[in-house]
Image (spheres, rainbow, N blue to C red):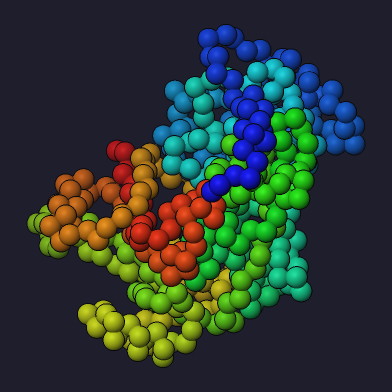
Amino acid sequence: MKFRNPPVLLFILSVLSLLIPWTTARTVSIDGFLQCLTKYPHPAHTIQESIYTPQNSSFQSVLVAHINNRRYSTAATPKPLAIIAAKNESHVQATVLCAKHHGLQIKIRSGGHDFEGLSYTSDVPFVILDVFNINSIDVNVADKSAWVHSGATLGEVYYAIGTKTNVYGFPAGICPTVGGGGHFSGGGYGFLMRKYGLSVDNIVDARLVTANGRILDRKSMGEDLFWAIRGGGGASFGVILSWKLKLVPVPPKWQTVAPQLPKEVFLRAQPQVQNIDTKGNKTVGVSFIGHFLGTSDKVVALLNESFPELGLQRKDCYEVSWVESTVIWAGIPIGTPIEILLNKSIDPGTFYKGKSDYVKEPIPKHVFDSIWKKMIEIEQIWLDWNPYGGRMSEISESATPYPQRAGKPIFCSILFVVV
């Protein structure tokens, strides 16, 4: 993207860099930071009950409540000097200003769903600003929009929209416990992206706290900064308080199926190691799950013409609403009430190492053969293959800081279970 006012943006970046101290040798005392918080001039919004230090009996439970990779919940993992479980915007402002004044790094956490624990670990003295309590959602069906605070999970967003309307939705990820603040600021890919692009392609406003404690919206922050936070990482430029989403039209009923093609179709391939006999011999099988924005008859005809090998039948399709499809994509049994989307509890999971990347060219068959052999060798491995294309190919790579558009057709996630 060509910035209209480069000096202004560079100045903003230099100010925000104060949030991240580069000197790690000196000892940082937490006492001054805590005193600063309690003296912050917002008496109506007391912050004391939102502060957790290692001396607090609830500290550990608050810390691990939003950690889904057990690699980062061990005794050896660096711990924050304090956790600020902010309950309102003034708590966010106080945390930013006091951390800046006392030379502490801030880690901002909305859901904690990152492979490498980036929102709750650091090698320098740090505090966690946890925004999970700031999670209100205001859906305006008439305006086809919704204001979503950063602590709201995707499940809460989907539920709020789905209980207000059955003809609008929003393109975002499949895991309902992912925090919207981090998801949107990183781009936000999901099962509607081939039709409507990423989450950030459908965000029209935002509010954030800058390094000097100011609260800005799109108009006051300017278009350059608004561009940067939509895919460039919200914590890089300030603390995102809330996002204004542009809702997208969806049919009242549509199909969750197994396969792909036009914009209305999204496909996910999931290779898995499988036993082929009782003697320990293994192979790799690939399952497909997808959805189609249209009728069952149309998708069956379309896929039987394009992929006759799959033998898709009407009985393989599940006719559901958009919000019901978000439950299915989360791996929750079909027919489960949508209230399950409001469950913010994170499965403690296992110890794992995850990596995502993009495939720029079609993968040759002999390379797949090598991948399958390696999967059988490792066994404890999980892969996801997600095609882009459709609307994604129509959006310029400079439209947002998320440049993986046309020419990078497959997004691949790999997860190794650490035994």
- Residue drawn at 77 percent across, 41 percent down: 215
Q: Position of residue 225 (x, y in %)?
A: 65, 44
Of the pair 342 and 322, the residue shown nearer to us: 322
- Residue drawn at 75 percent across, 70 percent down: 143
In the image, 194: left or right of 261?
right
Residue lying farthest right?
A: 44
Of the pair 114 and 389, the residue shown nearer to us: 389
In the image, 327: left or right of 106?
left
Asked whether residue 411 appears in the rendered view, the answer is yes
Against 222, residue 56 (above or below) is above
Q: Position of residue 79 (x, y in %)?
A: 54, 25
In the image, 341: left or right of 99?
left
Residue lying farthest top?
A: 26
Q: Position of residue 294 (x, y in %)?
A: 48, 84
In the image, 391: left or right of 80?
left
Q: Quadrant of residue 13?
A: top right
Looking at the rendered structure, the number of numbered marks drawn on it comes to 0
Asked whether residue 130 appears in the rendered view, the answer is no
Q: Position of residue 46 (x, y in %)?
A: 84, 33
- Residue drawn at 56 percent across, 47 percent down: 2
Q: Quadrant of the C terminus?
A: top left
- Residue drawn at 65 percent across, 41 percent down: 5
Against 316, residue 350 (above or below) is above
Against 197, residue 307 (above or below) is below
